[in-house]
Amino acid sequence: MARTTNNKTDDFIISVKGLKNAFGDSVVHEGLDLDVRRGEILGVVGGSGTGKSVLMRSIIGLQTPVAGEVTVFGEPNIGREETEATEIRKRWGVLFQGGALFSTLTVAENVEVPLREFYPDLSPALLAEIASYKVVMTGLPADAANKFPAELSGGMKKRAGLARALALDPELLFLDEPTAGLDPIGAAAFDGLTQSLQKTLGLTVFLITHDLDTLYAICDRVAVLADKKVIAVGTIDELIALDHPWIEEYFKGPRGRAAVATQEAHERADEEAARHPTEVQSKQSAPDDADATYAEKEARTR
Ligand SMILES: Nc1ncnc2c1ncn2[C@@H]1O[C@H](COP(=O)(O)OP(=O)(O)OP(=O)(O)O)[C@@H](O)[C@H]1O
């Protein structure tokens, strides 16, 4: 694997070495290595079927590898005793592809699922209080807590899934294609939410995505899966400098160029806002729909 960033003081929260995964004769990973640094947002990219989700499942213990080592929080995470595994599972949250909410439970009840599993003695009042706090934390209106998933838009479902992933105050967050299916405004809002949660809660984020805007906007480093392994990991600039045909095509193709343009536009807008803070302040307090949060706009439409 090409390691484009060299830092001797690295503090790895996840370390994968020599991973092999196979389904029958079909080998998905072979000799895969990957380190995730504490506090970073690591984007994981690769063509469809390269095994991004299988890698995530191997790290969180839902997929038993044929060979290799997975260390999370400095502890080996393969073949653990159930009680030890439970202690480690408490320290991460997962947003699965599609949200994976229980359709017969309200949003609050969905958020309560991991709380009930890991802290069965919590009172119903405390469970409800924690659930509503997590719901609001993800930018959903408070009354979304009592809604069923079918009553929510795609963006709200993602936020509800995120609220559940945050239920146990995790140190590590796994997000599997969190912006898939969202419109560009909703996707950008979700990226902003992920980044602000990562900064305020000090999270490490393992983020599988096909969304180039997300990679440019919030990822500290990106790992590229191809040929059954992580072929490179580094910042986007470092990856592009590697001169690898797939990476080149991925980041410099039409979608990659559009993502760069979007990112540059955001940076210009941020600089403008920094130069004219009072103007921005007065705009923010105006009842202009363009300045409403995504959650507020979504809430108004129902
Ligand atoms: N439970 C399973 N049984 C058999 N094959 C599986 C299973 N889970 C995944 N696979 C296979 O492993 C390969 C990698 O799947 P995975 O879902 O990890 O890909 P991915 O990179 O996340 O793809 P995408 O970007 O399309 O979501 C695929 O060929 C898939 O069919």
Image: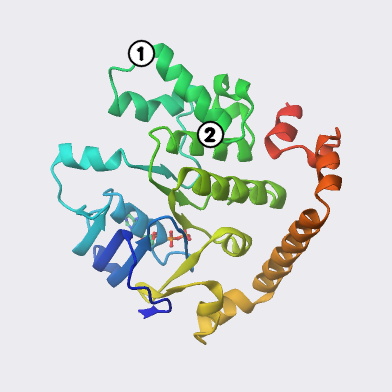
| Sequence-earlier tag: 1 or 2 | 1
SS for callout 1: loop
Total marks shown come to: 2
Q: Is residue 55 left or right of residue 277?
A: left
Q: Is residue 286 visible?
A: yes
The residue lying at 66 percent from left, 51 percent from top is: 188
The residue that label 2 is drawn on is 160
Residue type at mark 1? Ser
Label number found at residue 300: none
Measured as percent of width and height from the top left, residue 104 is found at 47, 23
Residue type at mark 2? Ala
| Residue 259 or residue 47, whichever sits in front | 259
> Quarter for ligand 1?
bottom left
SS for callout 2: helix
The residue that label 1 is drawn on is 123
Measured as percent of width and height from the top left, residue 177 is found at 51, 53
| Residue 62 or residue 40, whichever sits in front | 40
The residue lying at 59 percent from left, 60 percent from top is: 211
- The image quarter containing residue 240 is bottom right
Question: Mark 1 and 2 residues: CB-CB less than 8 Å, in contact?
Answer: no
In the rendered view, tell whether residue 59 sits above or below residue 25: above
In the rendered view, tell whether residue 12 sits above or below residue 132: below
Query: Cβ of disc 1 within 8 Å of ligand 1?
Result: no
Nearer to us of marks 1 and 2 is 1
Which colouring convention does the figure follow? rainbow
What is the quadrant of the C terminus in the image?
Answer: top right
Q: Is residue 258 left or right of residue 38?
A: right
Q: Is residue 105 visible?
A: no
